[in-house]
Amino acid sequence: MLNLFILLLFSFSAFAQTEELPHLSQIAQMNLPSANQNLQALYTGATKNLDTQFIPMSNGTVYVSTGDIPAEWLRDSSVQVRPYLFFAKENPAVADLVKGVITRQAKSMAVDPYANAFKKDYSVWEEKYELDSLANPILLAWTYWKYTGDASIFTVDVKKGFEAALSTMLLEQDHTLNSRYNHRELARNPVAQTGMVWSGFRPSDDACQYNFLIPSEMMLAQALLALSEIERTVYADVAEALVVEKLRAEVISGIQKYGIIHTEKYGDIYAYEVDGLGNYNLMDDGNLPSLLGSPLLGFTSLNDPIYQNTRRFILSKDNPFYFEGSIASGVGSPHTPKGMVWPLALLAQAFTTSIEVEFLQSLIMIINSDPGDHVLHESFNPNNPMKFTRKDFGWPNAMLVELVLTKFMGFSPLPVVRE
């Protein structure tokens, strides 16, 4: 059925070695049968959208604008550059672009590991401490290394950035005792010591209700596994690796002890947030990392019973942020108006199903979200895609490109950290 729905033909054109950054729209041009011209238009629009967001800087780094907000988010930029990884091994210009992004992220983390977004001069755009903003760059660097075999990215600057991130994680294991971080949008929520790492904000940039955010803890566990390998294999820093491994074991123990909640209807499921004091929040958010997307991290498997229970809950009306309409149904977010579905969540659903019909349904809903400008947006009205948020938002467009490359073009998926 899948092959009948989409017969993809791709042609590639080498891009000239110029002083400009390589453009994704030039690396892989996509030609589809006429029956699939809507997907072709969306894919072409996504690559062109990403082309506009990478800016070379005089110090050799690459600044990544999130889109219609002229700032670089550590999380967003980690995903926006992922489609380039597929071409980095064979093309030095592409490799340099990716390394320029990774180096800049590390320099930014060294400036302020509590910040989630930065300006071009490395000053802080926004200091909303989000655990995933520290985990994402580590996973990006590890993925580049494993996909290309190029360990040259692990410079002194990168190690400094990762050390700043690790120091912050260790301190925030006991936020109440150790941390001086605060933000005007945060309530002073009491928390227990759980082994997990405190986070002030969700990937949506909204304040946490309870400050142990389970999807981010899952991402952190995988980032720490990656960092342990980097420290041991590349930097030969066994002492640092031991610290990383101890922290990871404590985070995983905390997830298992506090992050799994028994429900009558679904059995054991992962909570979205907990405080370690018995309070928890059962929901999922369209932003990533999410509970729905946890197999993308390698923390859970598609067949894991607790993940499958959680998935059934997330994709039901029992999830307070699951919305349905005439052209789409999926997960939204309290960050956007009630009823709006996030393409990121539809993409996560497509990436994490082994059921062909569900994949096709997700893909059709993604295509139907196109309001006519041929790019994906932050959220859209599932009855009317002309109503959307964020005119220019690179993150979902990068995920769409990765979906097409891996599901239809024959590219192997990027490496995932696993024990």
Image (cartoon, rainbow, N blue to C red):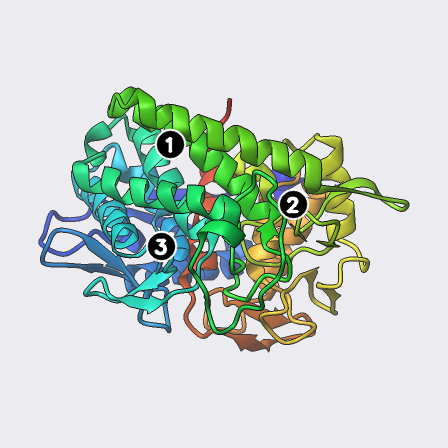
Q: Amino acid at mark 1?
A: Leu
Residue 153 in percent (x, y) is at 22, 36
Relative placement, left or right, of 358 versus 120 is right
Q: Give the residue furthest to the front.
A: 177
The residue under the point 76% across, 32% down is: 305
Residue 116 in percent (x, y) is at 39, 60
How crowded pointer 3 is (Cα within 10 Å; few <14, some 14-19, many 20+) is rated as: many
Residue 290 in percent (x, y) is at 59, 50
Q: Quadrant of residue 412?
A: top left
Relative placement, left or right, of 131 versus 319 is left
Residue beneath label 1, please?
A: 227
Q: Secondary structure at mark 1?
A: helix
Of residue 112 and residue 399, the one placed in the foreground of this image is 112
Q: Secondary structure at mark 2?
A: helix
How much space separates mark 1 and mark 3, taking CA atoms? 19 Å
Relative placement, left or right, of 56 versus 68 is left
Q: Amino acid at mark 2?
A: Phe
How much space separates mark 2 and mark 3, taking CA atoms? 26 Å
Residue 392 in percent (x, y) is at 41, 71
Which of disc 3 and disc 1 is earlier in sequence? 3
The residue under the point 70% across, 30% down is: 303
How much space separates mark 2 and mark 1, taking CA atoms? 32 Å
Relative placement, left or right, of 339 versus 8 is right
Task: Assess whether mark 3 and mark 2 are in contact (beta carbons under 8 angstroms).
Answer: no
Residue beneath label 3, please?
A: 77
The residue under the point 58% across, 33% down is: 252
Which of disc 1 and disc 2 is earlier in sequence? 1
Q: Quadrant of residue 86?
A: top left
Residue beneath label 2, please?
A: 359
Q: Is residue 282 above or below residue 392?
A: above
Which marked residue is nearer to the observer: mark 2 or mark 1?
Answer: 1
Q: Quadrant of the image for the N terminus?
A: top right
